[in-house]
Amino acid sequence: MELIQQFDDSILYYIYENWHNAFTDGLFITVSRIADCGLIWFVLAGIMLLKKDWRSTGIVMLFALGLGALVGTVILKNIICRERPFNVDETLQLISVMPGGRYSFPSGHSNAAGACSTVIFLRDKRFGTAAVVYAMMVAFSRVFLVVHYPTDVICGLLLGGACAIIMWKVMYKFTENTLEKIYLKRSRKA
């Protein structure tokens, strides 16, 4: 654990001491806030649910978000109980963002971003690449804003990605087939 903490501290303090300026502060506050409570991902899932060709993807995305939240936020955070960086070192100043809870590992923002960007990537590489880039920005923003350590966000991204792959394999074909049957029944009645 000591090696992991040294790794985390070296990156966290380097970013904290060298990367802050008016532009980066504004950028990463905005990136992080858009992802608060999974807002951007719920909006995207809602848009997908409205489009017939993407409806199954939206459903899988919501289930991946749910599984990630259950495993990451409900279970792991309360077992591991890792304090947030600014709680460990009071000289670290929060920059206009409030964390979602006391504990840091794994990052909920990164978990949600990893889950949703992976689902989008599995569905369509073109849109998925943009989603993955945004997910990386969300994860970085959490370290930049000193509410998470680097390993919190790395593990959050990986956990979210794993939840997405599980939900994709378990649900996508089933959801597609079920929706197709519903559409066929409706068209026959019409």
Image (cartoon, rainbow, N blue to C red):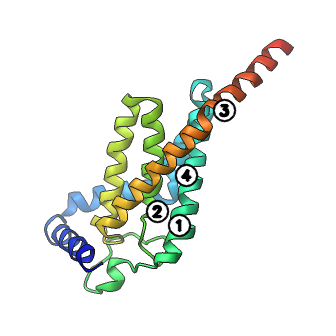
**Element on which disc 3 rests:** helix
Quadrant position of residue 159:
bottom left
Residue 124 rendering spot, x and y as whole percentages = 43, 29
57 relative position to 3: left or right = right
Residue identifier under label 1: 73
Quadrant (top left, top right, bottom left, bottom right) of the N terminus: bottom left
Q: Earlier in the sequence, mark 4 or mark 3?
A: 4
Residue drawn where x is 57% and y is 68% of the image: 74
102 relative position to 173: left or right = left
Q: In this rendering, which labeled residue sits more in front, label 2 or label 3?
A: 3
57 relative position to 126: left or right = right
Residue identifier under label 2: 108
Residue 46 rendering spot, x and y as whole percentages = 59, 40
Task: Decide: few, some or many residues near mark 1? Use Cα within 10 Å; few <14, some 14-19, many ≥20.
Answer: many
Residue 50 rendering spot, x and y as whole percentages = 62, 31
Whether the residues at callouts 2 and 3 have beta carbons within 8 Å, the answer is no
Whether the residues at callouts 2 and 1 have beta carbons within 8 Å, the answer is yes
107 relative position to 25: left or right = right
Residue 46 visible in the snapshot: no
Quadrant position of residue 144:
bottom left
Q: Amino acid at mark 2?
A: Gly
Residue identifier under label 4: 65
Task: Decide: few, some or many residues near mark 3? Use Cα within 10 Å; few <14, some 14-19, many ≥20.
Answer: few
Q: Earlier in the sequence, mark 1 or mark 3?
A: 1
Q: Earlier in the sequence, mark 2 or mark 3?
A: 2
Mark 4–mark 2 distance (CA, rounded to whole Å):
10 Å
Q: Amino acid at mark 3?
A: Phe
Whether the residues at callouts 4 and 2 have beta carbons within 8 Å, the answer is no
Q: Amino acid at mark 4?
A: Leu
Q: Amino acid at mark 1?
A: Thr
Task: Decide: few, some or many residues near mark 4? Use Cα within 10 Å; few <14, some 14-19, many ≥20.
Answer: many
